[in-house]
């Protein structure tokens, strides 16, 4: 090859704008191998070195490592293949950075406890699959040995928290609180009781639709009572909302002939009204970006008080017996 077509490292530096040190580094790594050497032993490069250096610089600016750059230049991998692979890797990095940004903003918004700080750290470092396992593990432990009501357990498994790629600080805070709630023994016990209670309900009915209808009826009865100025402690008459709601539940759950209907219904309301359980579903809705359902806590509280008063009054009358 004619010596006029060969370039020294200094000449390549002037033509490409890269430093001599950088070109020598690329040469040592095999990115731009020398074509030959001068009589004095200096490395010389052909015309293709200019093209290789330009492409190497572009790929490095895009964040590709040297090994990948060399594969592209040696045609062991195509530019489109490498670009697609690198773009996918960048997607993962971007999601991670967005999550860490949201965690930092959540920390800045509040003074987290040591446990919350630990959960926030785990949130920022765990993969999505690992975060899912943190909650699914709570479900495994909570329902261990429970053979009835597989539908309830399946519902819990189907509704797991899924943070979006770019979560808000509110969603981060909700996930942290939800993860902490999953470690709460009282919450685990309440969820298990709810599953056991529903396991005793008629299997031929659409339980989800049934509960929705009963909750709506409960809300309507409370609205009627509040509009009429009726306090829960006064709702013990035969025409009260408690009796009307009791009749609905008796019919729905085939307990019309049960003498302990009020006692059973009071226990059931206390189970379904557990604040931990309602908080779990509200936090889950926040994390997943679902519309929040109206809280039933005031409704359950009103009826629980009303039924407790009615039950106490009934038991007191039974204890006194007939007037002589």
Image: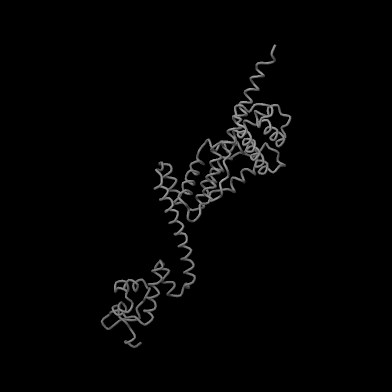
Number of marks present in the image shown: 0
Question: Whole-percent x and y of residue 322?
Answer: 70, 15
- Say which of 236 and 20 sits in front: 236
Give x and y (percent) for residue 194.
61, 37
Q: Nearer the viewer, residue 310 or 40?
A: 310
Residue 25: image quadrant is bottom left
Question: Residue 71: horizontal and vertical position, in percent?
Answer: 44, 71
Q: Which of these two is toward me, 51 or 158?
A: 158
Q: Is residue 68 above or below residue 263?
A: below
Name the quarter where the N terminus is drawn. Answer: bottom left
Farthest residue toward the bottom?
2
Q: Quadrant of residue 10?
A: bottom left
Left or right of 262: which side holds 23?
left
Is 138 left or right of 169, judged from the image as shown? right
Residue under the point 43% across and 42% down: 115
Residue in the image at 45% along x and 45% along y: 119
Q: Quadrant of the C terminus?
A: top right
Q: Nearer the viewer, residue 210 or 229?
A: 229
The residue furthest front is 228
Is 130 on the left-hand or right-hand side of 108? right
* Relative horizontal placement of residue 241, taking residue 284 as reference (left or right): right
Q: Quadrant of residue 44?
A: bottom left
**In the displayed image of the protein, which residue is found farthest to the left?**
40
Residue, x 71% and y 42% (percent of image)?
205
């Amino acid at each position: 090859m004619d010596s006029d077509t060969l370039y020294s490292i200094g000449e390549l530096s002037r033509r490409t704008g890269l430093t001599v040190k950088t070109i020598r580094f690329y040469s040592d790594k095999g990115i731009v191998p020398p074509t030959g050497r001068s009589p004095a032993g200096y490395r010389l490069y052909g015309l293709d070195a200019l093209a290789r250096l330009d492409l190497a610089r572009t790929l490095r600016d895009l964040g590709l490592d040297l090994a990948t750059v060399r594969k592209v230049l040696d045609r062991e991998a195509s530019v489109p293949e490498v670009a697609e692979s690198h773009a996918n890797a960048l997607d993962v990095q971007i999601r991670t950075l967005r999550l860490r940004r949201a965690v930092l903003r959540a920390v800045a918004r509040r003074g987290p406890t040591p446990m919350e700080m630990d959960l926030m750290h785990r949130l920022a470092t765990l993969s999505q699959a690992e975060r899912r396992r943190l909650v699914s593990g709570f479900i495994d432990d909570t329902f261990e040995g429970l053979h009835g009501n597989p539908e309830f357990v399946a519902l819990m498994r189907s509704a797991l928290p899924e943070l979006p790629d770019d979560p808000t600080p509110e969603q981060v805070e909700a996930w942290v609180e939800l993860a902490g709630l999953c470690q709460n023994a009282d919450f685990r016990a309440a969820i298990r009781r709810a599953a056991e209670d529903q396991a005793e309900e008629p299997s031929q009915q659409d339980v989800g639709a049934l509960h929705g209808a009963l909750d709506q009826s409960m809300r309507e009865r409370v609205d009627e009572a509040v509009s009429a100025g009726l306090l829960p402690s006064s709702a013990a008459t035969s025409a009260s909302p408690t009796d009307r709601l009791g009749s609905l539940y008796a019919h729905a759950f085939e307990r019309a002939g049960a003498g302990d209907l009020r006692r059973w219904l009071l226990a059931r309301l206390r189970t379904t009204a557990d604040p931990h359980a309602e908080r779990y579903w509200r936090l889950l809705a926040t994390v997943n970006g679902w519309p929040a359902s109206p809280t039933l806590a005031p409704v359950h509280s009103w009826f629980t008080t009303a039924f407790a008063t009615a039950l106490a009054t009934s038991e007191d009358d039974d204890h006194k017996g007939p007037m002589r």
